[in-house]
Image: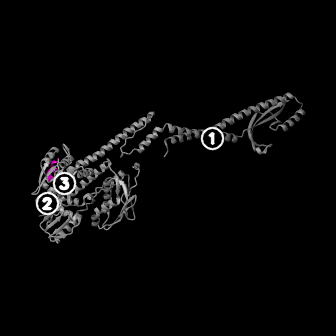
Amino acid sequence: MNKLLSKSLKAFILYAGIVLACSIPAYYFIIDLIWQHELKEHNLIISASVKQNIRNLSLPGEDLARGIQLWNKLQPEKQLKPVDRLQPDSTYNIYRRNQYIPAKGTDRFEGLVTYFEIDGKPYSLTVETNMEESHETIIAIAVITFFFFALLLGGFIYLNRRISRRLWQPFYQSLQKISQFDLNRQQPVMFEKTDIAEFEALNSHLQKLISANIAAYRQQKEFTENASHELQTPLAIVQGKLDLLLQSKPLTDEQSTIIDDTHTALSRVTRINKNLLLLARLENSQFSGKEMIDLGALLEKTLALLHDFAEDRSLAVEKNIPAGVKVMGNKILAEILLTNLLSNAIRHTEKGGTVTVTLSEHTLTIANTGREALRMENLFQRFGTASSHTPGTGLGLAIVQEICRHDGWKAAYSFGQGRHVFNIDFRVWILNSF
Amino acid sequence: MKILIIEDELQLAQNISAYLSDEQYLCEHAATFEQAMEKVTVYDYDCILLDLMLPGGDGFRILEEIKRLNKQDGVIIISARNSYDDKIRGLQTGADDYLAKPFHLPELAARVYSVIRRRNFGNNNVIRQHELKIDLLAKTVTIHDEPVVLTKKEFDLLLYFIGNKNRVISKSALAEHLSGDVADMMDSHSFVYAHIKNLKRKLNEAGGGNYLKTVYGTGYKWEI
């Protein structure tokens, strides 16, 4: 993931790199052009002075020939030669091996060939001047360009850091605040004041959004609690009426079956309602008071309560419950948690299966035999496992999860070697994982 | 036996009254806090069914008043709040029992019966019915003075039936009673059936009369 500022930095650096890279040939051509132009002028001046000086000497023919011979030997870069006829001046640019200092390799020369007459005879004068080789020029320019590029790069990064630290600081602060926000705890987020208009606007909008969210969430939770609560009395009335209806005479078997079926469905509604109310109370943090709970004793008690059910399904219950394991938590909730997990295990194990309960210092593991893994994604969600074919309300594991959250514990499920394994980690986890 | 139903929901009060009223019980009803206070202070009842949320005041204050007057009335709180704090507070203040709404009427009847037995018979709490003798404190049952060994659940069921005699009880109510807090365990119609079958067999084998009857295929009745 890219950071906002490094993204713009990358673009800047790329652009600067391209511009500087393009500047290398441009500089080269311009420098070479100026250089060549100056040398041409230089050659022209020299040739003009040579011509003039030779003419001014007015040497007789033989002396002149000897003089030219000597001249040519002493100054090979300025050759004077007799030619057949006069021609227009020409220039050339060549690379040639250095004859005097071979170690220097090839040198580049700018030359001028000019024609003139001495005493009516045509002569050519060749003037050559050493010029900087193009690859040397290019290397020099490239080195300088790269130096400046490095300078720019360093500057960009440094400035970028400074800017991000100063200018964007309020933004990052807001970001951190939002990431720490937990709807369940319902603590409104307070942003720090900033003098940058955009950030101030962002913060105020965020604040509005969050407060609206908290309000909506609270309303929803209160609604659940109120609704469940309001349902209790009518449910009690219906249940009572059914109990009374069963007393009326005469009653046929058919009518009695209808009453019984209604009773069964009503019991389910009642249980769902009860569990929803419990969840709402958990979420609204209406369970206060923590104490040291003797988990081993509580487990034994719960298992004793469920003993008949396990026996009814001919399940083998393997216990590994050491004494003296204590955890901090709400006792009523811990009892509900154990009951839910154990009754789930007993209810969902096929006849003749095995339920294993293992307690250690920090963890409780309840495993039961099963055929295939449960679908994980919905497991701990409300009504995630609900089905009208099972007597369960589909809320048991959601309640387990919520109790764990309440006391800072952690619930997990896994499947392996033909066993469903539910695991509760009693070490207090920091609540930011939600 | 006089029972006072303190409950603002008329339908619910009528249900309770209709179910409980027979040659044994006489029910009165108070729908508001003031009515309840008046009745409680003036008359004596064997059992008071107290709803905590009443128009005009908090049910806890009625309970406190009963205790302040040093009355011997048994009190069962029936509340829609089903809060553990309420339950603990209620029992600590001196209520005999706590029943969360919604409940089955047979469950209420069984509890009323048990509260009245405890209040009236104290240390000699023995129920006699023909050849059957149930010692509530020792939790033992004898038929023709011969002990019958019952499991805890069977003993529980027996008392439940005694508290609801001559009334039809649905399997649902029995299942709820037997599973209590673990009511989610309802595959338990067969579970109920197994326990009742055992109880019936044990009573018959000990020479008891056939009081426990299956009615209309789905309910049970303790007939006497």
Whether residue B15 is in magenta: the answer is yes
Marks 1 and 3 in Cβ contact (< 8 Å): no
Query: Chain for mark 2?
Result: B
Please determine whether, in this image, residue B208 is positioned above or below residue A342: below
The three-letter amino acid code for the residue at tag 2 is: Arg
Mark 1, other Cα within 10 Å: few <14 / some 14–19 / many ≥20: some
Indicate left or right for A335 with B168 as reference: right
Circle 1 — which element?
A: helix
- By secondary structure, the bulk of the magenta-drawn segment is best described as helix
- Nearest to viewer (mark 2 / mark 1): 2
The three-letter amino acid code for the residue at tag 3 is: Gln
What residue is shown with label 1?
Answer: A146
Circle 2 — which element?
A: loop
- Nearest to viewer (mark 1 / mark 3): 3
Q: Nearer the viewer, residue B9 or B49?
A: B49
Residue stretch in magenta = B8-16
> Which numbered circle lies on residue A62?
none
Q: Position of residue A103 (x, y in %)?
A: 77, 45
Quadrant for residue A421, please give it: bottom left
What residue is shown with label 2?
Answer: B167
What residue is shown with label 3?
Answer: A239
State how far apart marks 2 and 1 are (Cα): 102 Å
Q: How many marks?
A: 3
Circle 3 — which element?
A: helix
Indicate left or right for A404 with B163 as reference: right
Q: Nearer the viewer, residue B39 or B204?
A: B39
- Nearest to viewer (mark 2 / mark 3): 2
Please determine whether, in this image, residue B204 is positioned above or below residue A374: below
Mark 2, other Cα within 10 Å: few <14 / some 14–19 / many ≥20: many
Q: Position of residue A320 (x, y in %)?
A: 37, 64
